[in-house]
């Protein structure tokens, strides 16, 4: 019997066959499949983008709604309550939740605007990032925690034992889980891990402005200051902050070493130097190869045994 029967929850902006953009989709789907084969209960939490066909996924709307409070605008502003609808489906024993909100359901692609969206609203240029990306990210993270909190109260298998957060889009979650009282008390025994798929500057999902960051995350300035990068005024980096609250790894040992040695300081916004100064570290776990789906000798393959 697996010691992770309580559940591994992957929090991600991508998943193979549902929301695809880059390599994150493959890693998350591969890990989910492997963990499931090894006996762990696996849950995926994704945004419900507008391009996702809920009927095609046979996704069922759940009979409750989540409510989050976020800034009303894309800057420090008065708070507004956001209503989240939750859809559930399953794939090969993996439970998948889709969080449907005003910040997700109108999106035509995972990270950027499409040509169709630009035709409707010219200011939303094709290939440019979503204006409300921070709201979308925090809707996913806070929504995942609220969902786990809700399910733990109605089901024996609702409690998450591990939150696996993928890239900067989800890296505020460990700090929120530990520092917000209602989550801290409920998830006292829950652990978190953050995987950095791309540490390049521009992929961190950093938030500029302490007041805006406080409104988005619900965290106090004292906490958020742990994630402030040197030489970048009021820039709160979720990857740096997460290292104070979770195990953080990258997709290879060499990549982790390059970041920590300072070989990539220019391209990573000084992340390695900031981690070293704080006495924190990165580990690396090399991406695997899915021999079942990508065996050039066959159309498929055999399932891999548990490690």
Image: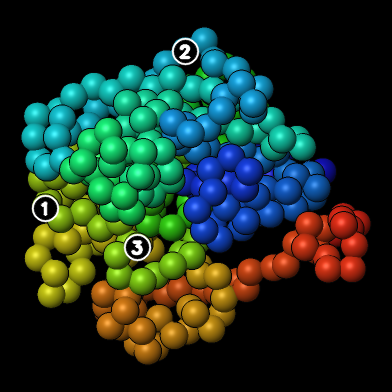
Quarter placement of the C terminus: bottom right
Mark 1 nearby-residue class (10 Å; few <14, some 14–19, many ≥20): some
Residue at left offset 9%, top offset 29%: 78
Q: Earlier in the sequence, mark 2 or mark 1?
A: 2
Q: For the residue labelled by badge 3, is the local secondary structure a helix, a strand or a loop? A: loop
Q: CA distance from mark 3 to mark 2?
A: 33 Å
Residue at left offset 56%, top offset 28%: 53
Taking 146 as reference, is 177 above or below it? below
Of residues 7 and 45, the one nearer the viewer is: 45
Residue 6: image location, x then y, percent: 65, 37
Residue 209 is tagged as 1
Residue 173: image location, x then y, percent: 39, 46
Q: Is residue 164 left or right of residue 216?
A: right
**Pointer 2 with pointer 1, Cβ within 8 A:** no
Residue 194 is tagged as none
Mark 2 nearby-residue class (10 Å; few <14, some 14–19, many ≥20): few
Q: For the residue labelled by badge 2, is the local secondary structure a helix, a strand or a loop? A: strand
Of residues 70 and 283, the one nearer the viewer is: 70
Residue at left offset 38%, top offset 22%: 84
Mark 3 nearby-residue class (10 Å; few <14, some 14–19, many ≥20): some
Q: Earlier in the sequence, mark 3 or mark 2?
A: 2
Q: Earlier in the sequence, mark 3 or mark 1?
A: 3
Q: In the figure, residue 31 lies in which quadrant?
A: bottom right
Residue identified by numbered label 3: 203
Res 143 visible: no
Quarter placement of the N terminus: top right
Taking 26 as reference, is 278 above or below it? below
Q: CA distance from mark 2 to mark 1?
A: 34 Å
Residue identified by numbered label 2: 64
């Amino acid at each position: 019997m697996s010691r992770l029967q309580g559940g591994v929850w992957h929090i991600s902006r991508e998943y193979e066959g549902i929301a695809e953009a880059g390599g994150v989709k493959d890693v998350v789907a591969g890990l989910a499949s492997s963990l499931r084969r090894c006996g762990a209960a696996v849950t995926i939490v994704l945004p419900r983008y507008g391009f996702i066909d809920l009927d095609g996924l046979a996704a069922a709307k759940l009979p409750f709604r989540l409510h989050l409070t976020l800034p009303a605008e894309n800057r420090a502003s008065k708070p507004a309550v956001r209503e989240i609808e939750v859809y559930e489906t399953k794939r090969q024993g993996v439970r998948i939740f889709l969080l449907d909100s005003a910040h997700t359901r109108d999106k035509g692609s995972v990270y950027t605007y499409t040509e169709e969206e630009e035709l409707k609203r010219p200011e939303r240029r094709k290939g440019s990032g979503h204006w409300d990306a921070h709201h979308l990210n925090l809707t996913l993270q806070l929504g995942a925690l609220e969902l786990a909190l809700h399910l733990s109260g109605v089901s024996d298998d609702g409690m998450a034992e591990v939150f696996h957060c993928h890239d900067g889009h989800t890296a505020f979650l460990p700090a929120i889980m530990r520092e917000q009282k209602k989550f801290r008390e409920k998830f006292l025994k829950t652990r978190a891990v953050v995987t950095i798929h791309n540490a390049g500057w521009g992929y961190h999902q950093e938030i500029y402005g302490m007041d805006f960051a406080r409104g988005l995350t619900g965290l106090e300035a004292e906490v958020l200051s742990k994630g402030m990068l040197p030489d970048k005024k009021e820039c709160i980096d979720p990857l740096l902050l997460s290292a104070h609250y979770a195990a953080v790894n990258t997709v290879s040992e060499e990549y982790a070493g390059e970041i920590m040695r300072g070989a990539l300081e220019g391209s990573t916004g000084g992340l390695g130097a900031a981690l070293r100064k704080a006495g924190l570290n990165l580990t690396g776990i090399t991406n695997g190869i899915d021999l079942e789906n990508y065996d050039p000798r066959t159309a498929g393959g055999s399932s891999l045994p548990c490690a």
